[in-house]
Image (spheres, rainbow, N blue to C red):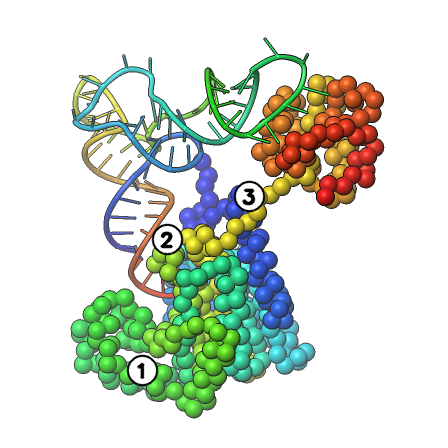
Amino acid sequence: MIKAVTGTKDILPNEISKWNYLESVVRSVFKSFNYSEIRTPIFEETSLFARGIGEETDIVGKEMYTFLDKGQTSITLKPEMTASVVRAYIEHSMASKQPLHKLYYISPMFRQERPQAGRLRQFHQFGAEALGSDSPMLDAEMIHMVYEILKRLGLKDLMVKINSLGIPEVRENYKKVLREFLLPKKNLLSEDSRKRFDTNILRIFDSKVESDQDLLKNAPMLINHLDEKSKNDFEIVKKILTTVKIPFEVDSKLVRGLDYYTKTTFEIVSGKVGSQNALCGGGRYDLLAEQLEGKHTPGVGFAAGIERILLACENEKSFNIPEEKLDFYIVTIGENLSEKVYEAASILRQRNFSVEFDYQNRSTKAQMREANKLNSRFVIFFGGDEYLSGMVSIKNMQSSEQRQIPISELQTINID
RNA sequence: GUGAGCGUAGCUCAGUUGGUUAGAGCACCAGGUUGUGGCCCUGGGGGUCGUGGGUUCAAAUCCCAUCGCUCACCCCA
């Protein structure tokens, strides 16, 4: 049997309604903040991600779906959206049309990792990018939007974590300080962290090894080494969040795995989804556009994992979707009236009612059971004595009331 | 890439030390008397016990391999 590829999942009809519901919430919140949708291709030239996300990152180093197309161009299935959005922004000279662009997306992403709870190889994200302004109001707005979406989805067990990484010079300086601090203890670090010491020392803060965390106890914190501008902007972000009553925690250890971040970074974690607990992550990336050979364009954005959010919603039973209802089920009695039934259904469907009937010539009882299973509000009976005089019976399935009407009345019938 | 656990009907699972035609619940289909649902009752279809090999008179049950799934590490949404 051919099965879906490891790490991919079919979304079957019985679960599609919650996806649609989530997407409708996402779109309406983005609309209220005046964000416009952007759709970019599923794949890009590999170098976009290599340069945008950073050669040293795990995403680029080992998780991308990369292949050569027939023209021998290296192609990669998008592992995240920011690089693509910035590419489109530059390619279409969007900066020249207006100074600030507020964009959102809902799209599948691809990363070749070992699947586990809340982690797939093809997964889906929604997210936003605001390009063209370095206002910290936009940083706060990003957090505000996801938080609002998660809240509307009924999630409660959430924690907003924010941090500031400062500008690159500050960060480089701080790295030196941290390196000096850790050097004497280097041999006591875990193997992974010793590697990070050389490649990306900030990441040591992410270590889940307890002894590593012990060694970091009195480490100098980046947050105390920020430049004035970064510090002020961070204060503004915090003030806005407080004003709109979004609880948050400053997590000076929050270092995100994409190279392009500057200043604000944030994450919202759920206590209800297992070990991959980040529902969303994001931050500011003021230097990315230049890295991609565009003009200097400050930007800030976030991405949220739809599967993880739905997992949290399920575990918190955070929302209910009303059952699908059918308006009419047409049952035939006795004789085969398929064209007549088809025609009647067609008339009702033209008026936008949802209508179903039996295709398999089954017994009346079987048709009734089907009508019941489909949650049909009304059943229309075709056939029998009354049909000879141009009448059909119509039954309200909830009250069980039944009356006869002329067939022609189906053209004007109302059910409310 | 590393580690652990699990693979019996569409789904959730029973099947205690190897022994007769492998079971249940749910789901599905048909029926419960002339043309009507939800509850209930009766019957039915559906499994080469993940796959391949081995041990044995005999294997879903023991051994080996292989594939798949799940969870965790790593990393991230």
SS class of the residue under badge 3? helix
Quadrant where the C terminus of chain A is found in the figure? top right
* Residue depicted at x 61% and y 37%: A375
Of tags 2 and 1, which is closer to the observer?
1
Separation of residues labelled 2 and 1 (CA atoms): 32 Å
Secondary structure category for the residue under label 1: loop
Q: Which residue is mark 3?
A: A13
- Residue beneath the point at 37% across and 60% down: A271
Q: Secondary structure at mark 2?
A: loop
- Please state which amino acid type lies under the numbered disc 1: Met
Q: Earlier in the sequence, mark 2 or mark 1?
A: 2
| Image quarter in which the N terminus of chain A is found | top left
Residue linked to disc 2:
A116
Q: Mark 3 or mark 2, which is nearer the start of the sequence?
A: 3
Q: Position of residue A88 (x, y in %)?
A: 60, 70
The residue that label 1 is drawn on is A221
Q: Position of residue A149 (x, y in %)?
A: 53, 64
